């Protein structure tokens, strides 16, 4: 088969490597011409384009069996609402509109942010839970991108929490330090939401699973068996261990306030391989306080 991977970041590269090893033909994209040569270690062909360039996306996807959209906004361009409005619209929605116009089969790596805080009730959040937080650009444009993908006859949306563990990716303590250095110790999310996160390798394996099982529609992807600790519990443990002041939570970007169900994709035969990376640190801190 032939695939076009729109966005050759960590996930795109790893996915391309796995698919090529299985004998598939891969075209990848980058927005940076200087990266083309290095990306040819992962893809048969690499094109320079942005997802908003629909004609270039269509040309790159010519003859492909599917487009896999792995683009992600640059967090350093999302400090203000105006920056988020521009970054999420251009990177997410426009890429998915271009992909859906170019192929009937599109797989999009989306976000749990579409649920906002999950709304009222105590039942686990699943794929039937209404999306919310429509005013916040980081949620609104993921939702808009999903709509574009699901307008395609064979569209598939995989919703993920925050990713960690990619090569060269920041550890959670490094993220806390960045929040202090770049955001003055303030973070856009709230304190009490469970800190769902997913290992980079689980992201890649879930996309391969979606390809192999020809999944269509929406799927939550996370550890279905355990509820993680809250943002405050995790980041308080990190700041205390690192000797940093605790973070201030602005609660501007809502996150699901209870368990998220991944039963749908688990029923298809998939499950994550990595557990909560922050559990041991939080448990150690709680033991010290007991």
Image: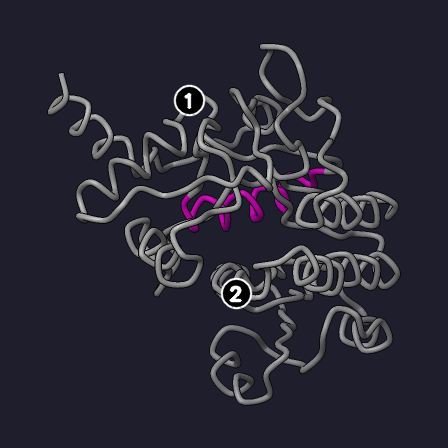
Quarter-of-image position of residue 128: top right
From this view, report whether residue 55 is shown above or below residue 69: below
The quadrant of the image that shows the N terminus is: bottom right
Q: Residues within 10 Å of mark 2 (few under 14, many from 20)?
A: few
Residue at 36% x, 43% y is 247
Element carrying mark 2: helix
Residue 74: percent from left, percent from top: 56, 64
Instruction: Give the CA separation, mark 1 to mark 2.
Output: 29 Å
Element carrying mark 1: loop
Q: Residues within 10 Å of mark 1 (few under 14, many from 20)?
A: some
Which numbered disc covers residue 227?
Answer: 1
Residue 26: percent from left, percent from top: 62, 69
The quadrant of the image that shows the C terminus is: top left
Look at the image and say whether residue 59 sits in the magenta stretch: no
Residue at 61% x, 61% y is 73
Look at the image and say whether residue 206 sits in the magenta stretch: yes
Residue 70: percent from left, percent from top: 62, 58
Which numbered disc covers residue 76?
Answer: 2
Residue at 50% x, 35% y is 190
Residues rendered magenta in the picture: 199-215
């Amino acid at each position: 088969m032939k695939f076009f991977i729109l966005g050759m970041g960590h996930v795109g590269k790893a996915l391309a490597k796995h698919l090529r090893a299985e004998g598939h033909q891969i075209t990848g994209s980058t927005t940076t011409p200087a990266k083309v040569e290095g990306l040819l270690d992962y893809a048969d062909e690499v094109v320079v384009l942005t997802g908003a360039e629909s004609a270039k996306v269509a040309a790159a996807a010519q003859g492909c069996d599917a487009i896999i959209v792995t683009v992600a906004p640059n967090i350093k361009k999302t400090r203000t609402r105006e920056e988020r409005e521009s970054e999420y619209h251009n990177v997410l929605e426009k890429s998915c509109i271009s992909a859906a116009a170019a192929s009937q089969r599109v797989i999009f790596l989306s976000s749990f942010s579409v649920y906002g805080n999950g709304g009222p009730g105590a039942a686990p959040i699943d794929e039937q839970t209404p999306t919310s937080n429509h005013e916040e650009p980081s949620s609104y444009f993921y939702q808009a991108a999903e709509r574009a993908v699901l307008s395609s006859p064979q569209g598939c949306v995989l919703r993920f929490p925050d990713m960690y563990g990619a090569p060269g990716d920041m550890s959670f303590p490094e993220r806390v330090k960045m929040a202090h250095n770049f955001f003055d110790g303030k973070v856009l999310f709230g304190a009490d939401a469970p800190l769902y996160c997913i290992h980079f390798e689980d992201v890649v394996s879930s996309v391969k699973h979606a390809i192999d099982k020809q999944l269509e529609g929406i799927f939550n992807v996370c550890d279905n068996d355990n509820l993680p600790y809250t943002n405050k519990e995790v980041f308080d443990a990190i700041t205390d261990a690192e000797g940093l002041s605790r973070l201030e939570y602005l609660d501007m970007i809502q996150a699901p306030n209870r368990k998220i169900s991944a039963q749908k994709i688990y029923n298809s035969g998939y499950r994550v391989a990595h557990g909560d990376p922050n559990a041991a640190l939080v448990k150690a801190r709680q033991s010290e306080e007991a």
